[in-house]
Image (cartoon, grey):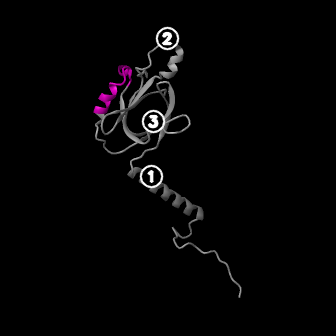
Amino acid sequence: MEATHSRRQPTAVIRPGMPWRTHYIVVLLTGLVLLSACAAQFGLGQARTQPIVIGQDTLAAQVSTLSGTPALPAQRAVAIAKGYVTTWPQASAIRPRYVALTLRTTTGTVAWGIQNRPVWLVEFPGARYAPAAYPESACACDRTFQPPNTDVAIDAQNGALVMDYGVAD
């Protein structure tokens, strides 16, 4: 008895006569839609990472947009943040964003235990970062640690300062 090998068609056929590549594309797109739905359900947006300066340390801030309504209103977070930015009147705008904040060192490890922390990130573009602990000097080298923009992270639940830092872009 001779065994015959025939190519068996899958039992879940999307559409008879459709090329196999199309099947794979449909499955891939379906997976992406489901993945997007899961990300939306958990309120996570796409993460953005940017270099920052805290005092005289260079780190990276990773932020992902959160959905939902935190206990602290945005207007209150802005009022609190202004207290930490003496240069806030120089800002071209003041933008509060509800985000999950992670700070990383240059080696990629989490800095100061701040990982996926829900905060109001209040951005002050045009308000130069000038922390009180570091007095200004005429030396151009100091400008490395005083970027042209300041961001302030305020705890979204209790209004406590999480961190303030300088941003170059």
Looking at the image, which residue is at 37% across and 26% down?
93
Label tally:
3
Say which element carries label 3: loop
Of residues 89 and 3, the one nearer the viewer is 89
Q: Which residue carries the number 2 mark?
A: 138
Looking at the image, which residue is at 52% across and 61% down?
27
* In the depicted structure, whether residue 105 falls above or below residue 82: below
* In the depicted structure, whether residue 81 falls above or below residue 68: above
Q: Given the image, on which type of amino acid does mark 2 rest?
A: Ala
First in sequence, mark 3 or 2: give its number.
3
Of residues 40 and 42, the one nearer the viewer is 42
Marks 1 & 3, CB-CB < 8 Å contact: no
Label 3: how many residues lie within 10 Å, few (<14), some (14-19) or many (20+)?
A: few
Marks 3 & 2, CB-CB < 8 Å contact: no
Give the image location of residue 109, x and y in percent. 52, 39
First in sequence, mark 1 or 2: give its number.
1
Q: Is residue 162 left or right of residue 142?
A: left
Q: Given the image, on which type of amino acid does mark 1 rest?
A: Ser
Say which element carries label 2: loop
Q: Which residue carries the number 3 mark?
A: 112
* In the depicted structure, whether residue 142 falls above or below residue 119: above
Looking at the image, which residue is at 50% across and 57% down?
29
Structural distance between the alpha carbons of marks 1 and 3: 31 Å
Q: Which residue carries the number 1 mark?
A: 36
Tell me the magenta residue range.
76-92
